[in-house]
């Protein structure tokens, strides 16, 4: 069965320090994996996606994520946090195969707090 | 916990007809709901922000006359795809916020023949 687990509901880091938001997944098929960011009262914005190409994916605003099949992980990282990075982050798994409907599973989200 | 439902979960319609998709927050009230669409292996695309009691805010490139959004109550938003064509076939997802937590509907698969 599909599932997405975001291991931390809240993460706090100081400005200028690295960010790590963790995501583990389970999938029966070859999944596509996404990270989205949501600022207050705004819709989701795509940060990056993995769709079976390079395992290290670079996204917008300096974020990147590495797909590790052996660990079933897709953690989101950024070398240096900015105040503007404070937001909610969602890890999402999407599956598509020829003999079943597409499925999309959302993680519960991780709220990132940036300390001055 | 809070739940967001969508109805129908899948629908097939003929080209030229209109289809209505409902998004309900089952045990909480949501002043704002979001509508997204997703093509296979693609990312979610925000279509519009649905505000209770006022007009929806559409993203650039989304035709508001084609994708009608009505947020009639604090627990219900509807998306109507008018005069649907095969290129409108997609997976439509809504979300709603309860306090500071976001909940997503299970999605509606629309296939236009």
Image (tube, coloured by chain):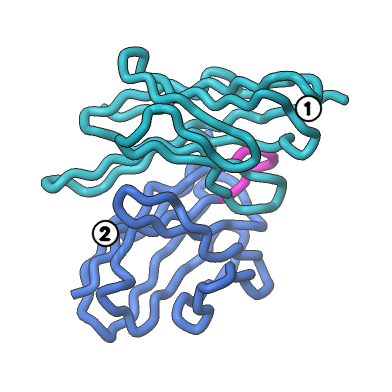
Chain colours: A cyan, B blue
Write the residue at 45% across / 81% down. B66
Write the residue at 29% across / 83% down. B17
Foreground residue among B53 and A62:
A62
Tell me: A76 left or right of B5: right
Membership of A4 in magenta stretch: no
For label 2, the residue is: B10
Residue farthest toward the left in the current orientation of the protein: A99
From which residue to which does the magenta span run? B96-102
Q: Chain of mark 2?
A: B
Q: Is residue A3 visible?
A: yes
- Residue A42, position as x, y percentages in the image: 66, 53
Quarter of the rendering occupied by the N terminus of chain A? top left
Q: Residues within 10 Å of mark 1 (few under 14, many from 20)?
A: many
- Residue A108, position as x, y percentages in the image: 52, 31
Residue B112, quarter of the rendered image: bottom left
Q: Secondary structure at mark 1?
A: strand
Residue farthest toward the right in the current orientation of the protein: A116
Write the residue at 21% across / 49% down. A101
- Residue B107, position as x, y percentages in the image: 37, 52
Residue A16, quarter of the rendered image: top right
Tell me: B83 left or right of A84: left
Quarter of the rendering occupied by the C terminus of chain A? top right
For label 1, the residue is: A114
């Amino acid at each position: 069965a599909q599932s997405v687990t975001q291991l931390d509901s809240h993460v706090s880091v100081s400005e200028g320090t690295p960010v790590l938001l963790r995501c583990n997944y389970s999938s029966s098929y070859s999944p596509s994996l996404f990270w989205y960011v949501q600022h207050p009262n705004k819709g989701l914005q795509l940060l990056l996606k993995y769709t079976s190409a390079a395992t290290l994916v670079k996204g917008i605003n300096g974020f990147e994520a590495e797909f590790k099949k052996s660990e079933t992980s897709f953690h989101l990282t950024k070398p240096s946090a900015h105040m503007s990075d404070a937001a909610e982050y969602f890890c999402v798994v999407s599956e598509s195969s020829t003999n079943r409907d597409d499925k999309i599973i959302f993680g519960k989200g991780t709220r990132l707090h940036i300390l001055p | 916990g809070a739940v967001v439902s969508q109805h129908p979960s899948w629908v097939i319609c003929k080209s030229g007809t209109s289809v209505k998709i409902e998004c309900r927050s089952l045990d909480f009230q949501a002043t704002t709901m979001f509508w997204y669409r997703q093509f296979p292996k693609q990312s979610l695309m925000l279509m519009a922000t649905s505000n209770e009691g006022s007009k929806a805010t559409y993203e650039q490139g989304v035709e508001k006359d084609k994708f009608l959004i009505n947020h009639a109550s604090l627990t219900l938003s509807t998306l109507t795809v008018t005069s649907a064509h095969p290129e409108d076939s997609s997976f439509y997802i809504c979300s709603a916020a309860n306090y500071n937590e976001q909940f997503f509907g299970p999605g509606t698969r629309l296939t236009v023949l």
